[in-house]
Image (cartoon, rainbow, N blue to C red):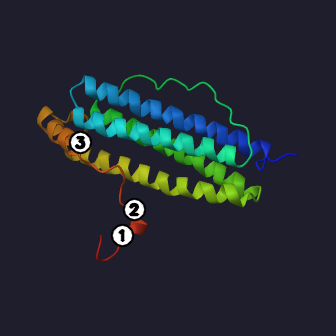
């Protein structure tokens, strides 16, 4: 008896996204190692935590594919690419990576809607919200870096930013979570 509840197209897309989440984890890991090497331990800590978060996302896709009776296909993870040129460059690249990931997530949502696979559509809604958080987090960090001087930030400003990121929460506040009492 066939217990697979995923179309071949959706199974392929979900497996590809699982690999993409692993790739994103490698990007964060690589950038964290770069930041640590440059003496930015707070930034490194923040990026190491986000690398773990991306690995958790990968596992969510893996488990979902298994629970829907699909076949998990583990493939090669692309290299994360070259080291950032600066803290500003690091977070610009992170923002771009998150935007690209959002586009991929939306593609799977569209596909599940077109196929009327409501279970997958529902599963993907968590990732839609998560990507909103990830993009908001990256934009907030870019705004802080811009205030610190952007690509021209001096060591004093980067020292303050590094210390602040060591204790920055992993989740951003989303627009739908705000109110008059809690802006």
Considering every residue shown, the one lying at the far front of the view is: 1
Asked if the residue under mark 2 is in contact with the one under mark 1, i.e. CB atoms within 8 Å, the reply is yes
Q: Nearer the viewer, residue 135 or 153?
A: 135
Question: Which residue is at a point 36% across and 30% down the rendered structure image?
Answer: 31
Distance between the Cα atoms at labels 2 and 3?
Answer: 21 Å
Q: Is residue 129 visible?
A: yes
Residue that label 1 marks: 178
Q: Residues within 10 Å of mark 3 (few under 14, many from 20)?
A: some
| Quadrant in the rendering for residue 112 | bottom right
Label 1, secondary structure: give it.
loop
Q: Is residue 85 visible?
A: no
Considering every residue shown, the one lying at the far right of the view is: 1
Label placed on residue 174: 2
Residue 18 in the image: x percent, y percent? 59, 38
Residue 82 in the image: x percent, y percent? 41, 22
Question: Which residue is at a point 45% across and 24% down the rendered structure image?
Answer: 81
Distance between the Cα atoms at labels 1 and 2?
Answer: 7 Å
Residue that label 3 marks: 166
């Amino acid at each position: 008896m066939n217990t697979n509840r995923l179309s071949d197209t959706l199974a392929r897309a979900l497996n590809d996204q699982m690999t993409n989440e692993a790739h994103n984890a490698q990007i964060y890991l690589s950038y964290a190692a770069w930041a640590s090497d440059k003496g930015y331990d707070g930034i490194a800590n923040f990026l190491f935590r986000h690398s773990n978060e991306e690995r958790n996302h990968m596992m969510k896709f893996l488990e979902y594919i298994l629970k829907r009776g699909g076949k998990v296909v583990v493939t090669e993870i692309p290299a994360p690419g070259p080291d950032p040129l600066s803290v500003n460059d690091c977070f610009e690249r992170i923002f771009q990576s998150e935007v690209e990931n959002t586009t991929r997530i939306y593609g799977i949502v569209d596909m599940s809607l077109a196929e009327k696979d409501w279970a997958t559509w529902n599963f993907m809604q968590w990732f839609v919200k998560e990507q909103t958080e990830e993009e908001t987090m990256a934009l907030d960090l870019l705004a802080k870096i811009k205030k610190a001087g952007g690509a021209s930030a001096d060591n004093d400003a980067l020292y303050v930013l590094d210390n602040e990121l060591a204790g920055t929460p992993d989740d951003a506040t989303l627009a739908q979570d705000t109110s008059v009492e809690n802006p």
